[in-house]
Each structure stands twice: as C-alpha cells, then as structure tokens.
Image (spheres, helix red, strand yellow):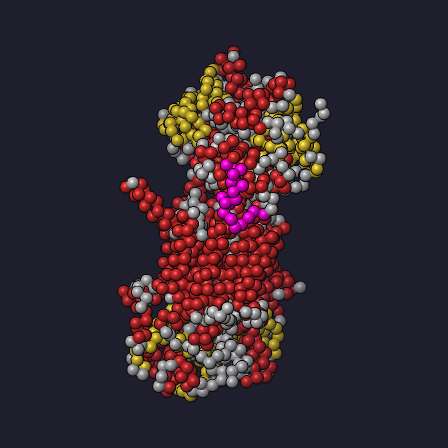
Amino acid sequence: MTPSGFSRRSVLQALAASGCVAPGFAWAQAAAGDLNIALLSQNSGNFATHGEVVFKGATIALEERGHTILGRKINLLRRDDEGKPAIGVRRLTELVETSQVKFFIGNASSAVGLAESEIAAREKIVQYAGGGSDEFTGARCNPYTFQWSASPYTASSTTLEYVRKAHPNAKRVYTLTVDYAFGHSLLKYTREAAPELGFELAGNDMHPLGERQYTQYFNKALAVKPDVILLLTAGSDFLAAVRQLSSYGLKKVIVAAPWAAELDELKELTPQMRAGLILGLNYHSSINTPVNKAFVAAAAKRYQMLPTYAMAYAYDTFRTIFLAMEKAKSVDSTAVARVMEGMQLDSVHGPTSIDARTHQTNRPYYVCLCKQPDAQKNDQDIADLVFQGDKPQPAALNQCSRT
Amino acid sequence: MAEPVTVLEAIELTKRFGKNTVVDGVSLKFPEGRLHAILGPNGAGKTTLFNLLTKDYPVDGGEILLRGERVTRLRPHQISRRGVGRSYQITSVLRELTFFENVWLASYRADHAGAPGLWRDFRAHWATAEKTRQVLAELGLEPFTDRKAADVSYGDQRLLEIAVTLATRPEILLLDEPTSGLSQRESERVKQLILSIKGKFTIIMIEHKMNVVMDISDDVTVMNRGKVIASGSPAQISTDAAVRSAYFGL
Amino acid sequence: MNLVAAQIVNGLAIGMLYAVMALGLSIIKGLLNVPNFAHGALFAVGAYVCYTLSTIGAPFAVALIGAFSGAALLGFLIERFGIANLTGGSYLLQVLFLFGTALVIEQILVLIYGTTGVSLVPPAMLGGAMDLGFMFLPRYLVFCALVGAFSIVAVWLLIEKTRIGSSIRAGIERREMVQCLGIDIGTLLTLGFALGAGMAGLAGGIALPLLGANATSGNDMMAIAFVVLVLGGLGSLYGAVAAGILIGVAQSLTTLVAPSASTLLIYVIMTVVLLIGPKGLFGER
Amino acid sequence: MLTLSSIDAYYGQSQALHGVSFDVAEGEILALLGRNGAGKTTTLRAIMGLNRVARGVVRFDGRVISGLPTHKIARAGVTLVPETRDAFSLLSVEENIRLGYRTGSPYTVERLLEMFPIIREFRLKKGGELSGGQQQLMVMARGLAMGPKLLLLDEPSQGLAPIMVNAVAEVLSALRRDRLTVILVEQNLRMALDVADRVVILEDGVAVDALSRAAALADPARVEKHLAVH
Amino acid sequence: MNKNLLALAAVVLLAVVAPMVIPISIANEIIVIAIFAMATNLVIGVAGLYSFGQAMFFGAGAYLTGYSLTAGGLSLVPSILIAIAGAAALAGIVGAVIIRRSGFYFMMLTFAFNQMAFYVVLVWSGVTGGEDGMAGIKRAPVGGLDLNDRSVFYAFCAVLFVASYVILRQIKKSPLGLVLEAAKENPRRMASLGYSVHGAQLAAFMISGAFAGLAGSLYVLLYRFVPIDSISWIMSGNVVFMVVIGGMSSMVGPIMGAAVFVWLQGLFSLLWAQWALLFGLFIIFVVFTLRGGLIELFKRVARIRRAGEAHHG
C-alpha cells in the first residue's frame, strides 16, 4: 500500500478488518494455513516516516524468502499505532482477535512497545522490540518479548569511549537529560561510565518531556564552561535542542548524544546544524558484515535508498524470527521463542547472540560523526561511522527477575 | 388600627457603576400586605434597586433588612429562600423549556428545601406537578402547558413570568414592569391578576402604566436619577410637582 | 546573579514570541468570540511558507512577510467560508469546525512536505552568539525579540492609529453599533481573523530557526498561547503581550531552580491568577 | 424622505410593532412619543435594520431599505444614536468621533468639537471614562460625524443631570437650524415639543396619533393622555 | 414513555449486536468510551459547562484501578468502586475551586488542571509508571465469572454500560437535570427562584467525574494496562468532540459519537496514512450538515416518516 491513493484491495481489507463486510472474511486467510505477522508502527503524526521505512525493511525480509516460511504463505498486516500506547494496545488486541497474529514488531517508542509487551506476554505473542528503554530486558522482561536495540548502558559507554578517544583532553561534561524513565536510565549509565573514562560530570539539568525551548538550559550549561555537552534526550526534543545550540555558534564545545535520534530524523536538521555532532546509533549502513552488505544492496535495488535504523530493525528482526522458525521447524510462538533464547546467528551486526534470560540482543553499538556541509555527497550521506563498542550491561544493573 | 409590620426595608442603599451612581442613598420601608408601586423615568434606578433588594447585584453602600434581619450580604438564592419572589422586566422565562417545566421549577423549589432529586423523572413528582397545573390553571395558561416558552407570544411569556414568580409561593413579591410590552387587553388581564392576589402578599411593583398604578396600588414612590423624589398615596403623587417635572420636564 | 540576568534576557526573547502568538489569539477571541483552535496549524503554515521562500532564495525578511501573508490568507478563507457560515450555531460547533480545519491543514502540510520536519539556518548575520560578558546571547534570540517587538508595535499602530484599527477595537466591544456606523461587520470579522491568523503565521516564521517546523509543531505553542491569552485577560488586547513576556521570563527563571517544573509552572500560574482575579491580569470585561 | 408603510417588527420573539406607518419630510424634526414599551426604540431599530421588519416596507430617499444589512442602511445616510449610549469605552473621545466620520460629512471633527465644547476638553480621554451625559454628547457627535441625511435620536436626555439636558437641548436647536432631518424619541415632553415640527404617538406598538407641534401645544391633554400620569 | 423504552431498546440492541459485527475488543472499547462520553455530556450538553479536562477523571479512574489491583492487591469490584469514588472526589475538589468561573475561563481552568494532573502522573513514575504506563494488571474473577474470557468481560462491561445509560438518562430527566438545563439558559433566574446554581453544577460535575472514573476503570481492565494517554488532554478533547459529533440533545448522541470516533478512526487509518485528513473533513462535514450532531440523522428520518404517515393518514 502506498501512502497516497487507495487500492480496491486495501479498501476491502480495511472494511473487513473494521467489520463492515461479513465477519468471517478476516478469519478466512488464517484458516487456509497462512501465517499472519504484524507490523505496528507510526504511520501518521510526526514520526510517520518511521512507519513507512519500517514497512520497507519488513518487505525486504519477506521478499528474501518469497513470502513463505515452512511452506506457508506469510501475510504482513500493517497497522497504525499513531505513536500512542493506547492505540497500539487497541490495534494489537484487535489483530490478535481477528487475525490470530502471533509475531509482531513495532514502534521505536518504548512507551508503545512496553504497552504492547503486556499483551505479548499474556497472549503468547513474540514481540521483537526496537525501543530504547532497558525495561524490555529489565523489570518488565517476559518470555515473549525480545529486544533488538542495544542496552542504553552499551550506548552510553560506547559514546563516551569514543569521545575519550577522539578528544583526549576533554574533561568537564555537562548533561541535559529528559525527565522521564528513558532519560533517567541514560543518566544513570552515564554516571556509571563517565568516571571510569576520566570525565568529570560538571552539572546536569532535567528538562520536561516535550520542551521546546532550550536556550535557558544552555545559558546555564555554558556558565560552567564544559568541554562536552551530552544530550541525554531523544526525538523532537533532541532536534530542538541541537537547533538552538547551533544558534550559539560554539566552536570549542563538543556535543555528543548517546541515544538521541536516528539518521532519518537528522534530516530534519540542516547540515550546518548537525555538523560535528557525535551521535550514538543502533545501526549504520556502512557496517561491514556479509548480511548487512546483502541487505544494503537489496535496499538499493528495491527502494533506491540507503537503509537506516528503522529499515534495518524491521529487516533484521523479521529475518531473525524466520531463522528461528526454521530452526524450530514450527510457527508456534512458544516454540519459536524458546529457540530464540540463546540463539546464535549471523545478523546485520555480524555474529550476534540473544541473551537467554533477558532476551537482550547482544550486538555492537555504533558511534557516528556528522559531516560538515561541504563533505556531504548526497542528502543521505549524513554521518560517518567512526567507532563501535559492545560493552554489555553489567549483570548487577539488570532488573529482570526471570530465571 | 395598629401600624402594619415592615417586612422589607432599604437603608441608604447605594450602587455605583463606574462613575455613575445609579442608586443613591435610597431608604424605603415596605409594610406587610400592601401593594407598593415604584415609578420613575427610564434610568431612574428602579430596576437596579430591585437587583439590590434581591442581591442580584452586590451592594456598594447601605443595608437591607428582611423582617428585621440584616440580609445585605446574602446570595440571591438565599434571599429567594427567605420568601422574596421576583419577576424581571426583560422576560426571563426559560425559553427552551415548556410552560410546565418553567412553573414546575418554581413549585419544586417551594416544595423541596434540599438539593434537587436526581433519580425520579421530574414529571413523576406528582404533588409538585399538581401544584404546577394549579398555578397554570389559575392564570389561564393551561392551553400552553406543553408549549415551549419561546414559541408563544410576548404577552403569554409575561404571564408565564408572573406564574413562575407566584409558584415560588413568596411572601414578598417584586414585579418589574409586569405589563411592559403588553397590549391594552393583555395588561388589563395582568392588572386583574394582580388585584386578585393583592393583600395575600406584600407586593412591590415597578410600573409605567399610570392607569395600572393609580387603580391598584396602595403606596407610590417616585424615583429619579437614583433618588427618591416623592412618596405617598396615588392621589398625592399624581399632583406632585416634582413628579410632573421629572416626567415632562415641565 | 549573572545567570539570573541571562535567564531574564532569554525569557524576554522567548516571551516576545509567545506574545506575538497570543496577540493574534486575542484579536480573534475578542472580535469573533471564538477560541482559535487552528492557531497552531496556522503557526505551522507560517513556518513552512517561511521555509519554502527561504529555500528558493528569498531574503529572510521577505520570507517572514510571506509567513504572515500566507497564514493571513488562509485565515481569511477559514473565516469567510467557514466560521461566517456557522454564526448562530452553538459555540462548540465553531470550536469543532476549527479543530477539523486544523486537522485538514496539518495533513495537507504532511502531503506537501512529508512527515520529516524541516529546519532553517538563519542568515549569516543573525548566526552565532554575542558575548555580553555575563552570558553568550545568540544573535538570533535578539533578532527574535526585536522582530517580535517590532511586529507587536506594528499591530499596535495598526490597531490604535488607523481607522480599521479603531473599527476592530470598536467591534470587539459593540458589534451592533459598529454596523450603525456604516462598517460592514462581516468584512471586519474576516479581516480581524486574517490579522490574528497572520500573527500566528509570523510567529511560526520567526520561530522556524529556533524550533524548526513540522505539521503539528504549532500545537505546543498554541497551548502556551492560550494560557497567555487567559492570563492576560480576555478583552484586553495588550494583556496578552504582557502575559507572554511574563510567562517567558518565569519559565526561563524556573530553569535555575526546578527545570522540570517549567511546563507545569505556566498552568499553575494561570490557575492561581484566575482563581484570585477571575478576569486574568489585565481583563477588562 | 422616510416612509414607513405598515411595519410589523419583532423584539426577540415578541411582536413589538403592529402595522406602524408614518413618514418624515426632509428637514423635519419628528418626535416619536409613547410610554415605555410602546415600541419607540423598536421603530428606530427597525429603520436601522437592527430589528427584523417582518411585514411592511421602509423607504428612504425613494429606495426600499428594509431588508438591507445595517451597514448599508448606515451608508445610505441613516444614523442611529441609541439610548444605550454605545460609547466605545476603549477608544478615546476623538477616536470615537473619527470612527463615525465619513468623507464629505459637513460635520468635520473640528466643527463637532466646536459644537460640543463640553467634550472638547475630554477629547483624549477614553470613552469609558466619561460620565453618562458626556457620553451622550459624544455619541451624538459621533453620529453627526457620519454626515447623516436622517438622524435617529433615542432618548438623548434620559437620566441626565439638568445641565446636561440643557446641553443636549442646545445641540438639538443647532440641528434644527441646520435643517437636519431627525426622528427624536423623547420622554421629556417639553424638550420634544421645543424642537419637533410634528409628533407621532405610539401606544402598544400601534401609531395612535399624529399631530403638528402647534396642535400638540394647543391641546396638551391629547398628547399627555397617551403618556402618563392622569 | 414509549420513546424512552424505544431508546433503551436501541441501546441494548447496540450492545448485543456490536460484538457480532466488529472485533469484540473494539466493540468493548466503544461501550467503555461511550460511558465516558455520556458522562461528559452531562457536563457539556446538559449543564452547559465546557469542561476540557474530563480525561483527568477518566485517568484518575484508570490509575486508581491499576494501582488498587497491582500494588494495592485489591480484588476487582473494590478497585472499580475506588476508581469511581476517587474520580468523583477529584471532580469535587477541582469543581469546588473552579465552578464559579464561567465560559471560556472554566474551559481553560479545566484544561489547566488536566495538564497538571498529566504532569503529576508523568513525573511520579515510581507509582504510575510515567511515560511507560502502568502494567501488570489482571482481571480477577468476580463471583465465579471468569473475566479473562473476552465475551464474559464484554457482557460485564455491557451491563455496566446499559446501567450507566439508564442512570445518566434518569439524571438528565430528573429535577437536577431540569435545574441544570434551566441554569444553562439563565443562571440568574434560577438563583432568583432559590436554587443554588453552583451547587447543582458541582453535583453534575462530580457525577460526571464518577462515571468518567468508571469508564477509565473499565478501560484499564479491558486492555489490562494504563497508558499515559488516558489522562492526556487529547483524551479530553476527543471526548468533547465525540459528544458534539454525536449530538448533545440526548444520551444516545454521545454513544453514537463514541462509536463513530473509535470505529471510524480505525477504518480511516487502515485506508490511508493520512487518515486524519479524512477525519478532519468528516468533522467539517458534520458541522455543516448536521448541526445537532449525528443524532440529527435519526430525528430527520423520524420527521420524514412522520410527515409521510401524516400524508398517508
């Protein structure tokens, strides 16, 4: 389905799913032995691009195996969760009822993913999440939810390691943290990692989620003359912060963000605004592994674009799920989940394992340096991969009570 | 014969709007059971005086005594519950409601001291409904029982206004120009109505139609520019020079 | 101490932006008695117009004028073909209409510009920061404050010194009498709405280098602008200006003591002010 | 100049005028008398297009104006000075008057300040800061600034202190000298008879009598019986 | 009388038929949100108080239920009762402070309180789960009923839905309802008749809060999760629009509004990523063609039918 224009089929599907047509219609597909898997992402609202790109990644994973697994046809059901937990839960419940969905991937928002993980646990549906929160593998871990993104611990330490390596003399770090769970955990891990690397935490400010005005924080931050400003905030808050920081025209201060935005979102900034920004990422298209090279080639062929996080997330998670299905020789969600626990595979990141207890995907985290405006070759050439690290979250910091 | 008891008294009542003093130190006594008319040209401050007596407006100066009790600081619904009923000059019937509903609300208040009930259909409060029908019948408004107030003539709305006021079963009745905007025939009807209830209530009435005032009132007070300029019997007033001057500039 | 001064300067600049936004709301609320729920969408329209003009090479000043005009034109259409046909209907119906219109405008912006937002680097002479000794003050913030102040003064002149301005003030107070003076109230309301809408668009344009733009980015600003409007007092055009600056400074200063409370703060201020003085700070009606 | 033919008009939902007919000749001052609620204000508002004319026709300068929007009636040369003294309280006195001014009006702002010395000293004050009488004069000046062919004056002396009543009376005499066409609603009978050429009496929404000034002065009882006390 | 029974029959029929034609969870959400919309109509439509803070009470019900069931360890019925009482109490406190303010000021104050409640929930994440919401909610059996069964839970909600409809409709027709309607038109007159207008309005605000709390509670039980959206001002805005779209003249209007809002949004979102555009156009369409809301459709049909009957008769 393309974003504009309707096809007759999409209208029919929509009518069926919402109950306009005979209610039996929606069940017919499953009865024929098809496998229904779902993609719940944000198709409307501010991060709607995300939904579009996730869909492309998923499509590549499906096309790779000709839309079949173990002799069954795979149907990909796509729903708009609007980036809201309440809607995500509504759509997933509806899918479970009408289409017997047992596998799904979802939104980059942790709040949405965590809300859906409740249903995953209860209805025994495999969820391969891509949010940033460590709750997926921590306090709210469950037998059916897996986490693709790196631990925020890995993100914080890898980013700081790069700053240390690139700027050996940098010492004073000022942090600006978004005031909710995700920001708190990044701050917690930064406080763990920074002293070990010889950084001094010169100050911190918490800003409310959704803040649009950052100059007052920067006034305060610059007053203590830091070497590094570390932005522990994400999404549109991060973009606004960078925009306003750039208006100061600072030359000497290093700006880094361990987990702020993916390259797609950075397109919202002008090249001047983001030049020199140090950014931690879950994925970068130049990762040098066989699986990733094939994937980048497929994306170039199919969509004429370089894959970014969202596309890679969808591709890699569905690919892993399909591999697990083959290994389990079953599409039963419990069987597949058991296989995924402790599974070793070759992913876009290279050799990768999934932690059997926490369900954390153990994989590297990447650091990029945003290019100067004149060094960009095209509008997708935003940042160079400069560093990677994979220091896992220390077991003592994990709150998952599963055994 | 003993002097009748004063039920309502205004002492030096004053009201200002910005720089304009609209009611300026008005002192009046209203004895029980009499019909007291208040006259005066437009803008004399009569309606404002009513609004002060019923506490629709806060008082800027002076006191109000109701049966000797100081009520100057009470709120409008508290004044109402102490037995002061009032009709308005600009018809204030509830236009979206039927005649029945309008009068029912007033009867219910008289029947029911506490918070309004919230379960039984209001029509199923039989005793109140019965009284409502009685009041409508007394004023000859039965044919309109289920008509919306907005859908009837102005004259019938004025009658409804009085019906509502009567249905609260007040002891003191404040009528603000009950005949304004009515035809000769209609205002004759209102006049007869007031005559028929005269003596049962203490009535204070703002009125312009001289034939109405002169025929039915016991006492008359004339106001001009916020002040009382004359008080007395209808006969005294009709010959008062100050009154003629206020009205005709003569 | 220096930090306090820095935050006050910062707050003044931001407050000016709120003031521009809220002044537009105030004009519309005053004249048409409608809370303009499309104000946020018009803010976004202004931002995108400014962006488009800038990217095709227009000088920033022209882009800002375009932001004003584009939103004003849209406001004109909304009033003439929408609200004007809903008078006499319930108040909520007009609110609902504006809500629907805002949705439509936002989605059309998405269709044109996509869901990824846009940013604009201000012209070179407005980039960078000035070292005031006690703080670095980004030049663009100064510009923001100046343009904000300038446009408020321009609107003030328009409203106080011109015939159409006195018609607007008169119309806010007594619609009927204005008609008796031979002024076409319909046209006046349309113009008033267009002017208010234009202010939203202008705010969007000014804010673009600071906040960027996406289809729904005006909604946060709109929420603040409504608070500012109420705080200033309905019926007082310039109360909104004072309240806007007040909120900007208050928010900026809270950052020193309790930064995460700054969003909550504006609602607390508004509630307290309304409960103590029910007509806002400068309300006249 | 103005002709009302069998006008029915409503005040809200209630019928306030029942087939009212009268006309006003150019240069004439017509006093409209009657008790409160007789329909005088409604008549003026109906002419002005503020109240709906349900039946009948209003002609002004040979053209039908009933049914036109108010601002068009105003532009045709009819001006209403309402009894509610709708001063724009946020505008200065001078702005109030300038807002009324239309090019070509013989009453320029300067001339009006001349005619109304009492408001000249307040010209920079806000309309809302004036006393009732001052407001009345200002609103009259604002109406005149429009250069009306027909001026509708609703109870200009109502509730005013005697000194202000005199000021209003002076203005009325000036208008009479200028041969301006005026419909004057007035409760103050003496004032009305001082300036009016003719009198029309309304009672309960019906025009019950019409007579010249001379006739009214000769037989005051004929007028008074419709108005008040006796 | 007849009309009342007819409306009741229609509401019951809707509750019975809905899960047969649309996914049961969507039908369930519709009847739960419909309770919320009816509660809101008591304040907006009947009393004429433009509250833009209704999600405060919905959210209070939601979080109280969530907390009682998880940390509180209470069983289901007490949790629901606590939600109702808590939401009503909150409405009582907020209402007592703001009920004297009218019109736009009232609207903005309810909005401000809603925002404050939202930030409290967001920041107090130790208890509420903050942005991530409150999880771990289970539907304990009630009197031998296994509420984990979708149909049983639906029936449970449907009974409460019909009961809420009956109660709120009775309140609308009760003396209190009439007093509110009258005070909406002319509060001064009601005071001069001796009614405490603010008292009546406060009562309505609290009753509305109680039912909003019930709806929030059932919503949480439906999805066994408390999303932070449940207390967001967007929820407050949405419910007002449901009421206005559906029609305020009867309690059936808000039900229609809720059904259309929940269902249509889902339908549009499947058709097109830019579904909000269609939704906006739909709203504009309703505003211009059906001023009284969707309930007008029925009234018009009834009018045409009556006219037809009169013609034939």
Residue appearing at x 43%, y 64% in the figure:
E155
Q: How far across and down, in percent of the image, does residue C139 sit? A: 53, 62
Residue A273 or E176: which is nearer the viewer?
A: E176
Q: In the drawing, does residue B112 fall left or right of residue E280?
A: right
Question: What residue sits 33% from the left and 80% below the top?
Answer: A297
Report the residue that reaches farthest toward the top: D218
A80 versus C200 height, above or below: below
**Residue A82 lies in quadrant:** bottom left
Is any part of residue C220 visible from this angle? no
Location of the N terminus of chain A (image quadrant): bottom left
Q: Position of residue C27 (x, y in %)?
A: 50, 47
Q: Position of residue A324 (x, y in %)?
A: 38, 84
The residue at 53%/81% (across/down) is A400
Q: Nearer the viewer, residue A353 or E11?
A: E11
- Magenta stretch: residue C88 in it? no
Instruction: Kindly tell me whether residue D89 is visible in this rendering.
Output: yes
Give the number of marks. 0
Camera-side residue: C269 or A276? C269
Q: Is residue C13 left or right of residue A9?
A: right
Residue E136 in picture, x, y percent from top left: 51, 73
Residue range highlighted in magenta: B115-133
Looking at the image, which residue is at 64% across and 32% down?
A: B23
